[in-house]
Image (tube, helix red, strand yellow):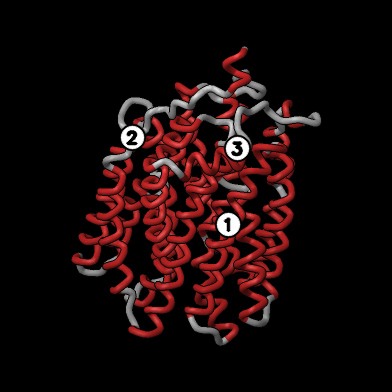
């Protein structure tokens, strides 16, 4: 497929968009206690809104992926950046659980679908050669991790200096910067009336993928990724404070996850160019479970938290490049954003359960222990699911018109 944008331009602009969108999103755990205390809500109320956000993100991801494949990433990113800013403003001023869920859960969830990986990876797939695709996806994922490292301490400082409401309004304004950045992802084939010619419709591509055992196992494994990372990302700050440690330990915990995931995602993308991507995924899921076990058995201390965060950070979003590279390798890139959206929907179902169960079981047991144990068991399951997946390209029977040609 001929390139329409330079690889450098795609990576820089795509990375900046993901840095903004994921950087803001990774800091939502910093608002759990301020918002619940200010409004007299339970942790489950906040957790449920974040759970809805992840579910809406996953559902909208399929639609946004189809739109990006058909009309281009630029238009999708612009529209969803505006929704993101509006959702953050509404999150700051919501006075009821329902209003908070609509703003934080529905509006921001839909907005995240059009400003993060599925849409950006579609541009990468169309404009980066196949022999560099896994590496390029690793660079984009690393950008999201750098956004976490960069934004989480900034968000905590904004909360301390201006209060939690004004901090959200400032982040809403910052999200609008994604609009001019997205201009660099404006592909020529989407500037006219038609998009890239395809041998399949979106419906045909979706049915084909869902009929493949390898795709379904990949989807099942990605469910576990969502459960683990969103439970930890949202509830880790409160878990650390419950252990009697200072808010700064919680802040630096999330920042270290982001910093070390810069290296982890880049490494996963690079290794995916040389080794089995499904083998890499199995190793990541298995190691996550092992790291959680060691962390729970270690006496609580700031140093234990920092070591856990650094090691978990290496494994955090390192599943993203190999997962999407497997999808591209099996099915091609014509419908990559949509198919990535389907895989990501499974991730977000896991995210829904991880963040909601964290709040639900905490309110009923006074502890996060049960959710930690579930995360360990799911990690082992995901490792076993990914091992037998074959990532060879799907061979399709030629259509009648193609045979005649």
Q: In which quarter of the image is the N terminus?
A: top right
Residue 59 — which label?
1
Residue for badge 3:
14
Image: 277 above or below 26: above
User: In the structure shown, which secondary structural element does the residue marked by tag 1 occupy?
Assistant: helix
Between residue 350 and residue 80, name the one nearer to us: 350
Q: Residue furthest bottom?
A: 40
Q: Are marks 2 and 3 in contact (CB under 8 Å)?
A: no
Pointer 1: residues within 10 angstroms few (<14), some, or many (20+)?
many
Left or right side of 356 for 335: right
Q: Which residue is drawn at 40% across and 53% down?
A: 257
Between residue 37 and residue 381, name the one nearer to us: 381
Whole-Å distance between the Cαs marked 2 and 1?
26 Å
First in residue order: circle 2 vs circle 1: 1
Image: 192 above or below 247: above
Residue 362: x %, y % from top left: 38, 79
Image: 46 above or below 313: below
Q: Residue at x 25, y 69 (%)?
A: 300
Q: Which of marks 2 and 3 is in front?
A: 2
Whole-Å distance between the Cαs marked 2 and 3?
29 Å
Pointer 3: residues within 10 angstroms few (<14), some, or many (20+)?
many
Pointer 2: residues within 10 angstroms few (<14), some, or many (20+)?
some
Residue 361: x %, y % from top left: 37, 78
Q: Do the residues labelled 1 and 3 touch (CB within 8 Å)?
A: no
User: In the structure shown, which secondary structural element does the residue marked by tag 3 occupy?
Assistant: helix
Whole-Å distance between the Cαs marked 1 and 3?
22 Å
Residue for badge 2:
390
């Amino acid at each position: 497929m001929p390139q329409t944008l330079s690889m450098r331009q795609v990576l820089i602009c795509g990375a900046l968009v993901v840095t903004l969108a994921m950087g803001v999103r990774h800091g939502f755990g910093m608002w759990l206690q301020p918002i619940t205390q200010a409004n007299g809500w339970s942790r489950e109320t906040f957790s449920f809104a974040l759970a809805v956000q992840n579910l809406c993100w996953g559902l909208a991801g399929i639609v946004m992926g189809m739109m990006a494949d058909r009309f281009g990433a630029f238009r999708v990113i612009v529209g969803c950046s505006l929704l993101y800013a509006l959702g953050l403003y509404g999150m700051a001023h919501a006075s009821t659980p329902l209003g908070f869920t609509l703003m934080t859960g529905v509006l921001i969830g839909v907005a995240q679908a059009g400003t993060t990986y599925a849409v950006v990876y579609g541009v990468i797939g169309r404009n980066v050669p196949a022999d560099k695709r896994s590496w390029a996806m690793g660079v984009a994922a690393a950008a999201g991790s750098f956004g976490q490292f960069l934004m989480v301490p900034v968000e905590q400082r904004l909360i301390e200096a201006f209060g939690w409401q004004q901090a959200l309004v400032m982040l809403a304004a910052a999200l609008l910067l994604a609009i001019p950045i997205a201009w660099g992802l404006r592909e020529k084939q989407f500037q006219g009336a038609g998009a890239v010619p395809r041998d399949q419709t979106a419906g045909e591509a979706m049915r084909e993928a869902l009929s493949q055992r390898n795709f379904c196992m990949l989807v099942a494994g990605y469910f576990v990724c969502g459960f683990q990372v969103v439970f930890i990302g949202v509830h880790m700050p409160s878990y650390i404070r419950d252990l009697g440690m200072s808010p700064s330990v919680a802040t630096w915990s999330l920042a270290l996850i982001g910093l070390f995931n810069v290296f982890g995602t880049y490494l996963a993308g690079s290794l995916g160019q040389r080794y089995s991507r499904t083998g890499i995924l199995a190793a990541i899921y298995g190691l996550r479970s092992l790291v959680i076990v060691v962390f729970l058995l270690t006496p609580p201390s700031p140093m234990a938290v920092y070591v856990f965060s650094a090691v978990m950070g290496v494994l955090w979003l390192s599943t993203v490049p190999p997962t999407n590279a497997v999808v591209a390798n099996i099915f091609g890139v014509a419908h990559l954003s949509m198919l990535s959206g389907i895989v990501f929907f499974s991730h977000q179902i896991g995210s829904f359960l991880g963040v909601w169960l964290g709040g639900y079981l905490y309110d009923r047991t006074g502890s996060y222990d049960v959710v930690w144990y579930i995360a360990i068991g799911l990690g082992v399951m995901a490792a076993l699911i990914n091992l037998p997946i074959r990532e060879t390209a799907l061979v399709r029977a030629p259509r009648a018109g193609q045979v005649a040609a």
